Image (cartoon, rainbow, N blue to C red):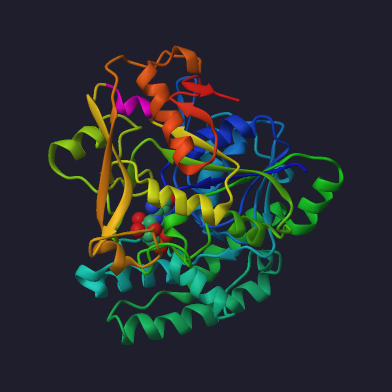
Amino acid sequence: MTVSIIIGAQWGDEGKGRITDLLGSKMDVVARFSGGDNAGHTVTIADQIYKLHLIPSGIIHENTTCLIGGGVVLNPKVFLREVADLRERGVSIEPDRLLISNTTHLITPAHIALDTAKEKALGDKAIGTTQRGIGPAYSDKTDRSGIRAGMLAHPEALADAIHAHIAAKNVILTTIYGAEPLDAEAIAVEYLEYARQIAPHLTDGVGFLHEALEDGKRILAEGAQGTLLDLDHGTYPFVTSSSPTASGAMLGLGLGPKAADKIIGVTKAFSSRVGAGAFVTELDGAAARRLRGSGENPWDEYGTTTGRPRRVGWLDLPALKYASDINSFTELVLTKLDILSGLEEIPVCVAYEHDGERVRFSADNDHLLACTPVYESRPGWSEDIINCTNFDELPANAQAYVNYVAEQIGVPVSTVSVGPARRHTIFLS
Ligand code: IMP
C-alpha cells in the first residue's frame, strides 16, 4: 500500500507543514482532505519561508501533483491568491499539477459574514474561530444547500446558485444578526471570474486518486488542524467543523478504511491551542512566555492564519494517547524539542484527576474544565540541540524525553525536529 496520512495529534499547529514537505518530496500525490484556509502551514526551504493556507504543501516539489479533496471547503479568492504568490516566487503551477475535486464545497463572502456575525453574537461564549467562513460552509454542506466546486465549470448555473445563496443568507444576516446585506450581483460577477480561472483545475478527485493507486503511485494525505479540534471527537463546541483525523482523511478523499499503511501523528514536545475551549495543561505568566516566544520569529507561538498568540502548556499525555487511539497512529513525529532546551525540569502531564479519581481524556469540554493535571517531572538538558543531526548526538536527557513519550503512548517516535529549518530534522527510523 502506498497511502500515508499526516495528522495533527493536538489542537493544530503541531508543525505538520514541515513533515508534509519532507515526505511530500518523495510522494507522487499530496492531497488535502479537510478544513480550508483556516489552516496555516509554514514550510521553510533554505531561507525561503512559505505560508500556505489552502494549497497542499507538496506544491513546492515540482514532480508532485496536489489535490484539494472533496472534504475541503475552498475559498476561491484565497486559492487564486496563493497560486499567484507561489508563481511570483517561481513555483510552477500548471492546472494538471494542482487539482480540485469537483465535490469540494465553496466558501462564499456570505459564509465569512455569517462566521463573523455569529462569533460577535456569542460574545464571551465565542468559539474563537478563524472567521474564514469554515463552519457556515460545512453547515450548508450538511444542509445539502452548499455550492460545489464542480459548478465552477457551469457559469450559468453558478450565477443562479450564487444569487439564491446570497438572497437566503441576507435574510439571516439582516434579520438575525442586524448585519448589512451582501450584493448578490457583485458576488456572482466575482465568482464567474474565479470560475474562469479555476475551472481548468477541476477533476473527479476520487477517480484521480484510485487511478493513481492502481498505477502504483505514492499518496500523502496532508492533515490540517488537529484531532482535538475534530467535530465529533474534539472539545465540542470549541472545535472546527470538519474531521481532521485519519478517518476524516478516508472520508474526505474517498479512500477505503484499509487504504493507509502509515498514519503519522504529529505532536509538539509541549502543547498549544488557539481559540477557546478546555486546555488542561495550560500555563500562564513567565512559563507560558517561555514556551510561546516573543513573536519576533516566524516559529514563535502566534497563529499563522490569524496572528493570535497561542495558548501554551506542557505536554499532555492523556490527550496524546486519546489522539493515538482515535487515529491508530503507526508513528509519532515530535516537533519543537529545541524549545525545551535550557529547562532544568520538564513537567509532563501523565494523568487527569477529576473528583479525586484518575480519568482519561474525553470529548467533553465541561468535564475537561473540571480536570486537574497530574505532572511527572522529566530531567531537562542545558545544551543547544539545533545542530544535532542524529539521535545519538542529542543530550541523554533529550533522548530520554523522546523515548519516554514513545513508551507512554505505545507508538514509536520516527522523527524529531530541533529547529525551524528543514535540515533541523532528525530521523530515528
Ligand atoms: P474554525 O475552523 O475557523 O471554525 O475555528 C474553530 C476552532 O478551530 C477555533 O478554535 C480555531 O482557532 C481552531 N482552528 C481552526 N483551524 C486551525 C488551525 O489550523 N490551527 C489551529 N487552530 C485552528
Number of numbered discs visible in the structure rendering: 0
**Residue 226 seen in render:** no
Residue 281 position in % (x across, y down): 27, 48
The image quadrant that residue 380 belongs to is top left
Residue 313 position in % (x across, y down): 27, 43
The image quadrant that residue 71 belongs to is bottom right
**Residue 120 seen in render:** yes
340 within the magenta span: yes
Q: Residue furthest front?
A: 357
Residue 403 located left or right of residue 176: right
Q: Magenta span: helix, strand or loop, mainly?
A: helix
The image quadrant that residue 352 belongs to is bottom left
Residue 403 located left or right of residue 397: right
From the viewer's perspective, is residue 150 above or below residue 48? below
Ligand 1 shown in quarter: bottom left
Residue drawn at point x = 61 percent, y = 59 percent: 247
Residues rendered magenta in the picture: 337-341
Residue 46 position in % (x across, y down): 49, 19
Residue 253 located left or right of residue 167: right
53 within the magenta span: no
Q: Residue furthest left?
A: 285
Residue 161 located left or right of residue 363: right
Quick one: quadrant of the C terminus?
Answer: top right
From the viewer's perspective, is residue 292 above or below residue 124? above
Q: Nearer the viewer, residue 78 or 146?
A: 146
Residue 157 position in % (x across, y down): 67, 76
Quick one: quadrant of the N terminus?
Answer: top right
Residue drawn at point x = 35 percent, y = 46 percent: 316
